[in-house]
Image (cartoon, rainbow, N blue to C red):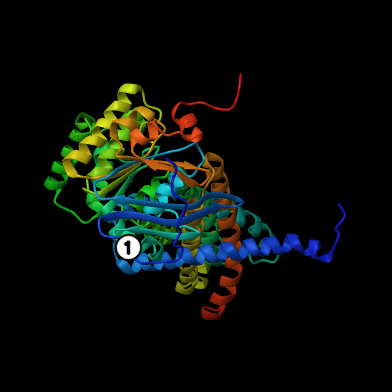
């Protein structure tokens, strides 16, 4: 099903309706001469898992970085639990970043810290100084991602999958209400990819975490998504359930999910 | 290439001027963020200690060697000329004042800019292009608080010691050249040196050391935080950090010398 025509409310700062956790309203973003986002409208409810798909370079990561205030829109508004992210400066962003955490595509682990120190970092920086409590929560988070035996390793000695799992442990340790995953399955073998999917599902079921997952992995989408958004030419081209995605008559959607290009051999 | 209008002729310098204004704006913003970080008084002492080791302890070798050999060669060259006029006993005084007021802080500053400025820009730049800086932001940690403030504090603590070492070893080398190279009695050298060098000369050296330390930190950290385009961008930022820091040290030193000469006039104290 194709997305409804955009009913933009640019400049409006009225808070979203009850139950809406994250809302993007008519978000536009341009880098130099290239217009990446051309009016994104999206709402996400508490506890929902949204997968974002679309061709490379269509602005999926850019859209996600708007939610956590790493990138500011040129036009439009981004709300997280009623707070307009655009109106906050970097230091005022703390309440948003307590609620929302993010797994970066390359995991973005700190090179000079061990796995244990990386995972403990958000707790320490949030002001927790009880070393016993920190140790307990780090162990719990690392057990959740099956990495409890690799506490003292440095990121450079971890495989791609282990780095991603460490990144997930760091993202979940503060018990954020929402986690943004930027291509959590990229570069992983099918088993590693399934481990990550199971972890995302576990977070969703055990803690009711709201998730936005940018991915190209169609198997993951059908396993974990409540809804799927497809970005195409800077807009939400499709928004619906995985089943609706599968049955969509839209040629762009079908080409994408079946991996068909216009290029002939 | 034919310029089609006077406006086209002005476009290039105009663009450079605009870039310069943007650069000044970014540096001012960084200084503002640093001031807020200082006011928050969250010092992260472990990071400060690590940076003191990297900046202060790690730079001693290069600063000592540079100071010592500059003091030695300065003495070697000036002694012969001074001897023509029968002033060779004043070499100690001249070298001492020059090292305290100019050579000590400038050489230490240039060496630290090369060694530490490059490391700061490369470290922070690598963190920036691998999204580690964004990861800090996502965890509610302001990059200036975590990356710039500890380096700034460590630099402020380390720089006076490095300047003092540069001056001390320069003087020691100068003394060795005059005593063992030219058989000048040590008493003459030391007497003239102590008579003509005072606390004001040392103060100028220390003040310059502080100022150069601040400039190196702000310029280099800015290059790191502004890095983009992967490894190429980090390399370019590192080069710029060293070049800009070194040039700014030499230019600021000139104006600082004039200013400080009003406060501590040479030869009248």
Q: How many marks?
A: 1
Taking the spot 19% from the left edge, 41% from the top edge, the residue there is A138
| Of A190 and B164, the residue lying toward us | A190
Disc 1: which chain? A
Residue B6 in the image: state x and y as whole percent.
Answer: 83, 65
* Among the 4 quarters of the image, the one containing residue B254: bottom right
Residue B81 in the image: state x and y as whole percent.
Answer: 69, 60
Whether residue B227 is situated above or below residue B9 in the rendered picture: above
Q: Secondary structure at mark 1?
A: strand
- Residue at the outermost front position: A249
- Residue at the outermost left position: A132
Residue A156 in the image: state x and y as whole percent.
Answer: 36, 32
Residue A215 in the image: state x and y as whole percent.
Answer: 39, 35
Instruction: Give the labeled residue for mark 1.
Output: A83
Whether residue A242 is situated above or below residue A179 in the rendered picture: above
Residue B227 in view here = yes
Whether residue B249 is situated above or below residue A265 in the rendered picture: below
| Of A44 and B189, the residue lying toward us | A44
Residue B179 in view here = no
Taking the spot 37% from the left edge, 57% from the top edge, the residue there is B154
| Of A241 and A83, the residue lying toward us | A241
Q: Residues within 10 Å of mark 1 (few under 14, many from 20)?
A: many
- Residue at the outermost top position: A265
Left or right: where A103 falls relative to B163: left
| Of B175 and B183, the residue lying toward us | B175
């Amino acid at each position: 099903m194709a997305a409804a025509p955009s009913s933009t409310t640019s400049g409006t700062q009225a808070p979203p309706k009850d139950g809406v956790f994250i809302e993007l309203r008519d978000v536009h973003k341009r880098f130099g001469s290239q217009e990446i986002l051309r009016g994104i409208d999206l709402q996400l409810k508490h506890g929902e898992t949204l997968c974002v798909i679309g061709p490379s370079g269509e602005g999926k990561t850019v859209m996600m970085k708007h939610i956590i205030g790493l990138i500011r829109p040129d036009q439009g508004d981004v709300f997280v639990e009623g707070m307009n992210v655009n109106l906050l400066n970097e230091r005022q962003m703390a309440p948003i970043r307590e609620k929302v955490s993010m797994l970066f595509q390359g995991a973005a682990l700190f090179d000079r810290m061990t796995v244990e120190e990386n995972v403990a970092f958000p707790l320490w920086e949030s002001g927790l100084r009880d070393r016993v409590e920190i140790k307990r929560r780090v162990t719990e988070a690392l057990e959740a991602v099956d990495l409890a035996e690799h506490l003292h390793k440095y990121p450079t000695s971890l495989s791609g999958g282990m780095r991603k799992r460490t990144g997930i442990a760091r993202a979940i340790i503060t018990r954020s209400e929402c986690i943004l995953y930027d291509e959590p399955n990229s570069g992983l073998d099918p088993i590693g990819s399934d481990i990550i999917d199971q972890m995302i599902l576990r977070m969703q079921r055990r803690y009711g975490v709201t998730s936005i997952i940018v991915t190209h992995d169609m198997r993951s989408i059908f396993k974990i998504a409540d809804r799927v958004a497809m970005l195409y030419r800077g807009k939400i081209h499709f928004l619906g359930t995985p089943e609706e995605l599968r049955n969509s008559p839209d040629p762009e959607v079908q080409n994408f999910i079946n991996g068909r290009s216009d290029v002939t051999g | 290439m034919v310029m089609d209008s006077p406006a086209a002729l002005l476009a290039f310098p105009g663009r450079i001027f605009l870039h310069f204004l943007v650069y000044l704006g970014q540096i001012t913003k960084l200084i503002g963020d640093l001031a807020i970080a200082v006011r928050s008084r969250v010092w992260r002492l472990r990071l400060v200690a690590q940076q003191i080791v990297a900046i202060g302890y790690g730079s001693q070798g290069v600063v000592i060697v540079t100071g010592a050999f500059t003091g030695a060669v300065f003495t070697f060259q000036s002694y012969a000329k001074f001897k023509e006029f029968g002033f060779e006993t004043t070499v100690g005084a001249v070298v001492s004042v020059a090292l305290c007021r100019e050579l000590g802080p400038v050489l230490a500053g240039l060496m630290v800019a090369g060694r530490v400025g490059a490391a700061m820009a490369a470290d922070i730049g690598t963190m920036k292009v691998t999204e580690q800086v964004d990861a800090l932001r996502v965890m509610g940690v302001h990059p200036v608080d975590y990356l710039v403030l500890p380096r700034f504090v460590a630099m402020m603590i380390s720089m006076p010691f490095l300047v003092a070492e540069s001056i001390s070893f320069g003087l020691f080398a100068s003394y060795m050249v005059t005593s063992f190279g030219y058989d000048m009695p040590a008493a003459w050298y030391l007497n003239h040196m102590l008579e003509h060098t005072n606390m004001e000369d040392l103060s100028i050296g220390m003040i310059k050391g502080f100022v150069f330390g601040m400039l190196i930190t702000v310029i280099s950290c800015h290059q790191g935080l502004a890095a983009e385009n992967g490894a190429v961008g980090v390399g370019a930022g590192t080069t710029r950090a060293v070049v800009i820091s070194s040039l700014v040290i030499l230019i600021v030193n000139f104006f600082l010398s004039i200013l400080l000469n009003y406060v501590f006039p040479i030869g009248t104290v």
